[in-house]
Image (spheres, rainbow, N blue to C red):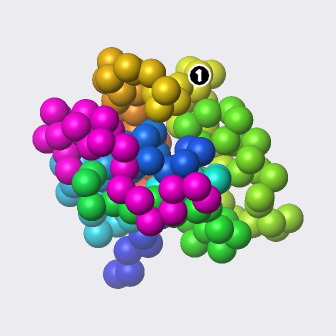
């Protein structure tokens, strides 16, 4: 039996605050569910400013408070081929969702959506704020990624789980 691997890409503006945190938290949920062979996780930014850089230290510290290590991640920019490589491209906010849709090739297979689309909310950018903003982002990302994992599990064949 061949297991189909689901591929999930989280996207924010610079790929140093929200999307690396979402990647780390989602990976943590995936590992807890024992699905690390079935679900691949990555993150990217719509802008290129921070390519090759580590996540913002405040995102790293916030993740560490919850037993998640994102310190080895490196920022990268969203590429056209990501629309074929990933099943889900998940935006942190409406502005980045629009940017993602603008970059998308005419025909692509990715499911492009907001992380909190059911709540009709954005994950706010904490970059220019205080450390508490990162804690709030963590809470939103934790709940949103958990819900996303449940949706993906419902789509999977029971033999894959």
Tell me residue 56's x, y (percent): 37, 44
- The part of the image, by quadrant, that contains residue 94 is top right
**Most distant residue in the bottom direction:** 1
Image quadrant where one finds the C terminus: bottom left
Position of residue 96 in the picture relative to residue 134 (left or right): right
Q: Residue at x 55, y 48 (%)?
A: 14
Q: Residues within 10 Å of mark 1 (few under 14, many from 20)?
A: some
Position of residue 88 in the picture relative to residue 136 (left or right): right
- For the question of whether residue 149 can be seen, the reply is no
**Most distant residue in the right direction:** 106
* Span shown in magenta: 48-69
- For the question of whether residue 65 can be seen, the reply is yes
Q: Residue at x 66, y 74 (%)?
A: 81
- The part of the image, by quadrant, that contains residue 18 is top left
Position of residue 46 in the picture relative to residue 125 (left or right): right
Position of residue 48 in the picture relative to residue 34 (left or right): right
Q: Which residue is mark 1?
A: 121
Secondary structure found at label 1: loop
Number of marks in picture: 1
In front of the other: 33 or 51: 51
Tell me residue 135's x, y (percent): 31, 23
Q: Is residue 126 above or below residue 114?
A: above
* Residue 33 highlighted magenta (yes or no): no
Image quadrant where one finds the N terminus: bottom left
Q: Is residue 137 above or below residue 56?
A: above
Tell me residue 109's x, y (percent): 69, 65
Q: Residue at x 67, y 41 (%)?
A: 96
* Residue 50 highlighted magenta (yes or no): yes
Q: Residue at x 32, y 23 (%)?
A: 131
């Amino acid at each position: 039996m061949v297991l189909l691997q689901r591929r999930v890409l989280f996207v924010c503006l610079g790929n140093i605050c929200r999307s690396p945190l979402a990647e780390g938290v989602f990976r943590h949920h995936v590992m807890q569910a024992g699905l690390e062979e079935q679900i691949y996780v990555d993150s990217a930014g719509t802008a290129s400013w921070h390519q090759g850089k580590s996540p913002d230290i405040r995102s790293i510290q916030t993740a560490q408070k919850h037993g998640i290590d994102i310190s080895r991640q490196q920022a990268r920019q969203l590429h056209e081929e990501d629309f074929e490589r990933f099943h889900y491209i998940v935006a942190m906010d409406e502005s980045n969702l629009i940017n993602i849709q603008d970059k998308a090739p005419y025909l692509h297979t990715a499911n492009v959506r907001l992380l909190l689309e059911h709540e009709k909310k954005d994950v706010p950018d904490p970059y220019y704020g205080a450390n508490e903003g990162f804690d709030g982002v963590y809470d939103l990302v934790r709940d949103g990624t958990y819900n996303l994992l449940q949706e993906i599990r419902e789509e999977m064949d029971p033999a894959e789980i």
